[in-house]
């Protein structure tokens, strides 16, 4: 991903680093060598039966009568093994994102997150030009606070992004939305049971940021994620937690990029969380413009970046898919009334990424007002 490129990039696993998981279907158990399928007396099952639990072979429809299968017929589990669940451990979002939480897990652990709440629609997270792999993602929130109460407002460590690899395609435009584990129609408020691998982006050996003297503020703080999700099953709907309104101190902390400044702990806490900037000063770029490179705007006084990576589309002229036009406002505002978005890492910078250009900002971008568009989402 080049610094000058545009993409639907979520700040996630980069092209060429994908590792496909195995088959996600059920497989028949074939380890039994005694006891046919459902003997009429011994009920040997597919596990070890009695000493002579029938003459049928494993998995046979006629695995013997089980007449001499012993009084108990064995305790085999029989049937199917789901490789998606195999080896997974049930955890909470907090145990994935907070290294100090009781029962916390690190990287490369297969976890089950039950009852998490979708906070976004599904989107193409990244596309590999080398392998053709399509990576899909959805942001989710913990349903409860760290101490077990209902979560009514997003909080530190309450969010994570779930990623799943779909069918390879010749181009990003041809990535198919129904070939991975995340439901194609997932929407905010859907309750999901998720199974996937804990990981970070980027892995330390693939970190490209922080070594360019021309960009001294680049971060090297990774983003926590659930990668290679093999399940994201809908189980219901729930109220969406309201966005946490960032305090001035939190905005200042989130604008910092270096571990030496405490950024690692801050971004681990608020990474992938739906948050809101409210009544904060507008900081202009060096040229005096409100909108800077790549459609970015700044929240003052410490240059907290707000980008357009989630709604910008290369070559589009649609109002909802181009950079905001705040410099067309007259008079120019000095305060952000409100900005909503996810706190994430994109490229080499941690910042805020709104999803809906025409609904996320106050003041509203003038082109949205002129077109009478109040929301870009269905």
Image: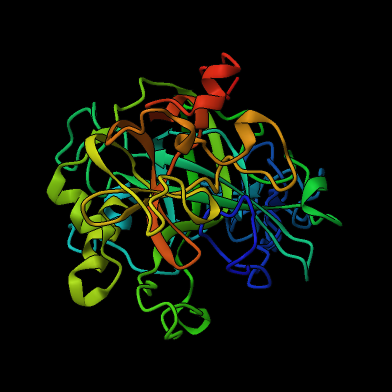
- The one nearer the camera, 312 or 200, is 312
* Residue drawn at 72 percent across, 50 percent down: 36
In the rendered image, the quadrant that contains the N terminus is bottom right
- The one nearer the camera, 221 or 296, is 296
What percent of the width, then of the height, locates residue 47?
60, 55
* Residue drawn at 29 percent across, 27 percent down: 242
What percent of the width, then of the height, locates residue 83?
61, 55
* Residue drawn at 57 percent across, 13 percent down: 372
Q: Looking at the image, is 185 positioned above or below residue 90?
A: above
Q: Looking at the image, is 144 positioned above or below residue 73?
A: above
Inspect this view and state whether residue 126 appears: yes
Q: How many marks?
A: 0
Query: In screen coordinates, is 177 left or right of 157?
Result: right
What percent of the width, then of the height, locates residue 313?
67, 44
Query: In screen coordinates, is 258 left or right of 19?
Result: left
Q: Looking at the image, is 133 positioned above or below residue 229?
A: below
Inspect this view and state whether residue 375 appears: no
- The one nearer the camera, 199 or 68, is 199
Query: In screen coordinates, is 140 left or right of 78?
Result: left
Single out the residue that lies furthest toward the top: 372
Toward which corner of the image does residue 113 lie, by quadrant?
A: top left
Q: Looking at the image, is 201 positioned above or below residue 94?
A: below
What percent of the width, then of the height, locates residue 221?
35, 70
* Residue drawn at 17 percent across, 30 percent down: 149
Toward which corner of the image does residue 150 lie, by quadrant?
A: top left
Question: Which colour style is shown?
Answer: rainbow
In the rendered image, the quadrant that contains the C terminus is top right
């Amino acid at each position: 991903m080049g610094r000058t490129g545009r993409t639907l990039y979520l700040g996630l696993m980069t092209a060429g680093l994908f590792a496909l998981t195995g088959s996600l279907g059920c497989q028949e158990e074939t380890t039994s060598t005694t006891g046919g399928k459902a003997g009429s007396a011994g009920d040997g099952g597919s596990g070890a039966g009695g000493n002579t639990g029938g003459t049928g072979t494993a998995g046979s429809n006629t695995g013997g009568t089980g007449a001499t299968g012993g009084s108990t017929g064995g305790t085999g589990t029989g049937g199917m093994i789901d490789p998606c669940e195999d080896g997974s451990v049930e955890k909470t979002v907090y145990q994935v994102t907070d290294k100090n939480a009781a029962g916390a897990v690190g990287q490369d652990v297969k976890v089950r997150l039950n009852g998490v709440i979708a906070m976004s629609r599904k989107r193409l997270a990244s596309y590999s030009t080398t392998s053709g792999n399509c990576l899909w993602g959805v942001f989710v929130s913990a349903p409860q606070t760290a101490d077990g109460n209902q979560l009514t407002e997003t909080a530190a460590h309450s969010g994570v992004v779930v990623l799943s690899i779909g069918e390879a395609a010749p181009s990003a435009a041809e990535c198919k939305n129904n070939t991975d584990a995340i439901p194609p129609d997932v929407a905010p408020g859907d309750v999901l049971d998720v199974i996937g691998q804990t990981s970070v982006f980027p892995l330390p050996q693939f970190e490209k940021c922080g070594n360019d003297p021309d960009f001294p503020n680049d971060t090297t703080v990774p983003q926590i994620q659930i990668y290679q999700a093999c399940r994201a099953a809908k189980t219901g709907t729930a109220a969406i937690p309201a966005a946490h309104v960032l305090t001035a101190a939190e905005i200042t902390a989130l604008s910092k990029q270096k571990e030496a400044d405490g950024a690692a702990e801050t971004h681990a806490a608020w990474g992938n969380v739906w948050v809101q900037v409210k009544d904060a000063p507008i900081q202009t770029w060096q040229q005096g413009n409100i909108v800077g490179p790549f459609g970015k705007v700044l929240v003052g006084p410490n240059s907290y970046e707000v980008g357009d990576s989630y709604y910008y589309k290369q070559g589009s002229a649609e109002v909802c898919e181009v950079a905001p036009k705040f410099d067309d406002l007259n008079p120019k505002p000095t305060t952000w009334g409100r900005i909503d978005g996810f706190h994430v890492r994109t490229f080499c910078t941690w910042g805020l990424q709104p999803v809906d250009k025409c609904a996320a900002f106050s003041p509203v971008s003038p082109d949205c007002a002129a077109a009478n568009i109040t929301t870009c989402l269905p």
